[in-house]
Image: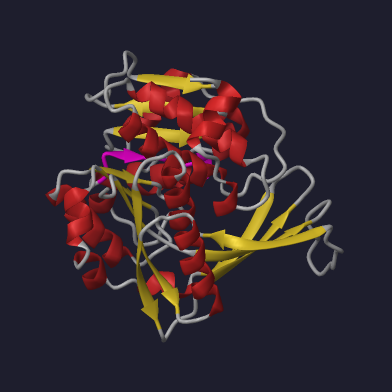
Amino acid sequence: MAAQVLVVGSYVQDQAWFVERFPRPGETLRANRYNTGPGGKGFNQAIACARQGVPTAFIGAIGNDTFGGFAEKFARDEKMPCRWQIRNDQPTATSSITINAAAENQIAMIFGANEHLDADFVRAQDDLFAAAKALLLQLENNLDALAAALELGRRHRLVCVLNPAPVHAQLDSAMLHAADIITPNETEFSLLLERFAATQVDPATLAQRDDAELHALARKLGVATVVITLGSRGCFVSHGDDRRSDTDAHYRLAPEKVKAIDTTGAGDAFSGALVAAMVLFHNAPFRRAVTHANRAAAISTEIVGTAPAMPTFDAVVARFGR
């Protein structure tokens, strides 16, 4: 079956260290545990989407190295088709993740091959775009490749979803407005407001603001639908003129109750599951897709790792019902 969701994005080999607390500058701490596995916002979201039972394909760049081989094997094991641009001049991206006892994380990353995904390589995958229903992007790649993907997505009338993470220094309003839906977290939302709406807000205060104020702030970005992920405080949805079959122009969903041990990748679980649920529940209000994504993200925090922690559709339903 042709892929219904196409993800163009990053692969990163995650390396995680678990500590009681974050080290102070110059301090060396003994880690309690170490884990390495597949990650990268794009790959995480593709796996999250595929595990909801929606045919998903991934386009990305890796190095001709051990970590690149690991990426190819993991995708094969997941039975998720990929179009890899294998670079001989760049390494596969890798990250260093430190996670404390409160399940908070600090991340450093080298983007490697991700920043050299050729725009012409993306354009050469037109057959995938032609068959898909939705396109999902992030910002861990070079923007010319992502712009090419958005151009193809618009040409083939796909629903274009952008997870603006991390907020790229060269992201412009044209690319932002090419998306039908964006899924920033509090920090990303604040950065977007500062850059595109000349509005400064403290990301730490966003979850405490009332819904009308959050909606007004979201409307300043000029994107049809804005979904702000608020971590342990749930998420907030703001629609423009097109409410995507929702009754309300804006609303908030509370977080699901889980025992979080590793929040790394929870936002990726949300974005990937959201796009999958939009396909699965295409005749239902958007709220249903958001609810499913909120639940998938919650479950992902109970498992160590990123891509391997993405829950399946059956796991979400078994935990929370339909």
Q: Is residue 111 rendered to the left or right of residue 303?
A: left
Q: Total of numbered circles in the picture? A: 0
Above or below 58: residue 240? above
Comparing 14 with 283, the one in front is: 283
Comparing 112 with 193, the one in front is: 112
Residue 263 placed where, x, y %?
A: 64, 44
Q: Give the range drawn in magenta.
A: 179-187
Comparing 60 with 172, the one in front is: 60
Residue, far top: 247
| The quadrant where residue 22 appears | bottom right
Give the residue at x 49% y 59%: 77
Give the residue at x 62% y 59%: 107
Above or below 71: residue 43? above
Give the residue at x 66% y 25%: 257
Work out whether residue 128 can be spotted: yes
Work out whether residue 230 can be spotted: no
Residue 92 placed where, x, y %?
A: 49, 74
| The quadrant where residue 300 appears | top right
Q: How are the colours assigned in the image?
A: secondary structure
Residue, far bottom: 89
Q: Is residue 263 rendered to the left or right of residue 201?
A: right
Q: Does the magenta stretch include residue 185?
A: yes
